[in-house]
Image (cartoon, helix red, strand yellow):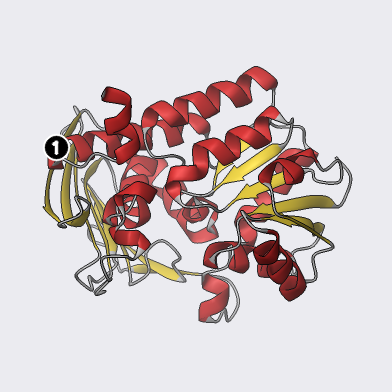
Amino acid sequence: MGKTVRWGVLATGGIAAKFADELRATDGAEVVAVASRTEASARAFADRFGIPKAYGEWSALVADPDVDVVYVATPHHAHREAAGLALEAGKAVLCEKALTLNAREAEELVALARDRGLFLMEAMWMYCNPLVRRLAELVADGAIGEVRTVQADFGLAGPFAPDHRLRDPAVGGGALLDLGVYPVSFAQLLLGEPDTVQAHALLSPEGVDLNTGILLGWSSGASALLSCSVVADTPMTASVTGSEGRIDLPHGFFFPDRFTLRRHGEEPEEFVLEGDAPERDRQSLRPEAEEVMRCLREGLTESPLVPLDGSLAVMRTLDAVRHRIGVRYPQELAMRA
């Protein structure tokens, strides 16, 4: 892998646009191609971001010899197909979260990447955030003692129309895969895969979750109280409480610019993102892109910051939540028929 890593962007939606825009400001990154279901959409995206090649077929992008790594930004239901296509073509892949619709699809992708010796990473940008990394280090080093509870929420007020993708079961709609993946991933970053999963949800007429509460438990006695919603504007905060203290993250816990460590008997200690970072920099996807490129240059097939086993564990938890709230996607129902 040379100094410059050449990216192909697969899909042209909002998150793809944000990522392509930030790659332009990332040292050592170059977006050389984009693909969509239609050539017109790909061409419009290419013109917008100064990308030299635009393809109306995914297969053309993954076959392009100038592409080193493919960023998959499709809706959830297409992650397995798109990422699998790229891996089959011998490309490294960064795939948006949640990694797939379900754990079975995720296991297939991970097995394919490992069999081919190719890089694969879920785009869990929260794990690459420098303050989240620092928080995880503090917890692992015992700064708050043994973890007892984790609390986190991510909710949007909406309202979202019935034809919005967040209400469409065919594309993996609902609060869980889009928003709930953050609180679940945060809890599992600190405690690993839970031993028990409980959940309750308000479902839409279409059969996706609109408002979901999750209770995770570990054999250590630790628990996590999590929630996600597309019908309620929640605080979007998080806290981790241990036997010897607590860490609190403010609004936007998944892209924090600060957090507070409160040890028993000591003054609170505030950790702040270096520099005077504006909101747009707090939400930057650049650390995620830089981690992918670092791994590729070092010949790694997965990131130590976003390990594949961790992504698989999160998918198993999301599956367990859906099982308990009664959400099934059409693709899954078709397989059982």
Name the residue nearer the viewer: 150 or 313. Answer: 313
Q: Residue at x 76, y 32 (%)?
A: 299
Which amino acid, mark 1? Arg
Q: Residue at x 52, y 35 (%)?
A: 307
Above or below 286: residue 232: below
Q: Is residue 252 left or right of residue 74?
A: left
Q: Is residue 43 left or right of residue 52?
A: left
- Which residue in the protein does label 1 denote? 324
Q: Position of residue 208 (x, y in %)?
A: 22, 52
The answer to whether residue 239 is visible is: yes
Task: Estimate how packed mark 1 is, as few (under 14), some (14 to 19) or many (20 or more) residues with alpha carbons within 10 Å.
Answer: some
Image quarter where the N terminus lies is top right
Q: Is residue 255 left or right of residue 173?
A: right
Above or below 116: residue 322: below
Splitting the image into 4 quarters, where does residue 174 fall? bottom left
Name the residue nearer the viewer: 228 or 242. Answer: 228
Above or below 282: residue 182: above
Image quarter where the C terminus lies is top left
Q: Position of residue 223 (x, y in %)?
A: 18, 41
Q: Position of residue 317 (x, y in %)?
A: 28, 35
SS state under label 1? helix
Name the residue nearer the viewer: 199 or 241. Answer: 199
Extreme residue toward the top, this view: 115
The answer to whether residue 193 is visible is: no
